[in-house]
Image (cartoon, rainbow, N blue to C red):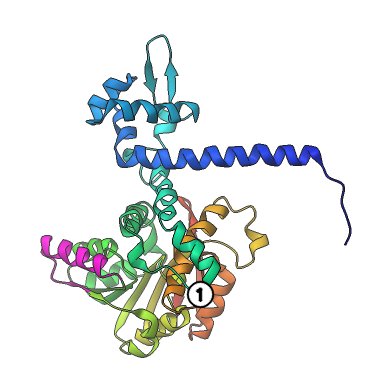
Amino acid sequence: MATTEFDAERAEAFAGRMLETLNGGALAVMISVGHRTGLFDALATTDAATSQELADLAGLSERYVREWLGAMTTGRVVEYEPSTGKYRLPPEHAGWLTRAASPDNLAVTAQWIPTLATVEDDIVQCFEKGGGVPYERFDRFHEVMAEESNQTVLSVLFSHILPLVEGATEKLEAGISALDLGCGRGRALLMLAERFPSSSFQGYDLSAAAIAYAREQAGERGLENVRFEERDLSTFDVDAKPESFELVMTFDAVHDQARPLALLRGIRRSLTEDGVYLMQDIQGSSHVHENIDHPGGPLLYMISCMHCMTVSLAQGGDGLGAMWGEHKARELLAQAGFTSVDVHQLEHDPFNAYFVVRP
């Protein structure tokens, strides 16, 4: 085996990068806390505040707020003036960390770090023994996913996403049948059902808790044109009713299915001949070396390992993973019987691709 000379400068540089990573991970946890407690939102409403003033404004314990501000200050997220003892959130930072900044609120995304870390022990066991971690082990997954989807999907559903499918808005206004698979809490379908009362909508998801939430929301809003069903989609290739829907949608859902090809074949089977399948999924390459410069590469592979891949394996599935990439997606779509695939990206969403697929 060939030996290489130890590069001390390179080693030192790598150690520095690792320290930045540790600080970044710690900061991500505290940013998640700041989002969940409303601290960023409260701080953005005032020019500057002491820890006590901020705690009073947010209705929180001052001692915890003070320690959180320590992390934010040393992390260069918040500015501190020693002479006044006041903290300030620069507007340039607030534009990426507050609820008012949505869909650009990266504090929402920061929640994935502590949320998925809760299953680390389970994942370590899977590394040793194989298998996967089931959906029910992820306490906040659907809550965080709903917030994430609110930014990437719901905020631009009518303005940017539906227009990708030529004539979709007009057909929904006239009245068609549409299906959302892996619908989660059903927020996209609820919006569609409200906007297009002449159309009928169905949503399927494996999570009983998510479906219960979606049904409750539909009932509270008095929507009678939308129905939600708890359903295992691993056999959708044979369970789908032929030619039942003019529009089928999946939002960030295919890659974590137990059997993605079975799902796609079922979608092909369930579409009318002039129907359209709209698939939002992770933007990336099927080849790891082509993802080295991806702006969210490590984050997406982490989410894949800690959730997307493992929930599929927990069902005895393929474990495709979030970074299956456009090449693999096109391959599976072709195997499922689709002949036309157009891929789009939206300027506000560098992490996802939008596939407009036809029979």
User: What x and y, as percent, mark residue 146?
Assistant: 32, 56
Q: Is residue 256 magenta?
A: no
Query: Which one is nearer the viewer's eye here, 26 or 95?
Result: 26
**Residues rendered magenta in the picture:** 207-228
Look at the numbered disc 1 and give the secondary structure of its residue: strand
308 lies above or below 149: below
On-image quarter of the C terminus: bottom left
User: What x and y, as percent, mark residue 251?
Assistant: 38, 65
* Residue that label 1 marks: 341
Residue 19 shows in this picture: yes
Residue at left offset 48%, top offset 51%: 347
Circle 1: is it few (<14), some (14-19), or many (20+) Cα within 10 Å?
A: some
Residue at left offset 35%, top offset 60%: 138
User: What x and y, as percent, mark residue 268?
Assistant: 41, 84
- Which kind of residue does numbered mark 1 sit on? Val
Query: Which one is nearer the viewer's eye here, 330 or 315?
Result: 315
Residue at left offset 25%, top offset 76%: 176
Query: Which one is nearer the viewer's eye here, 47 or 314?
Result: 314
Query: Which one is nearer the viewer's eye here, 37 or 118?
Result: 118
Residue 304 shows in this picture: no
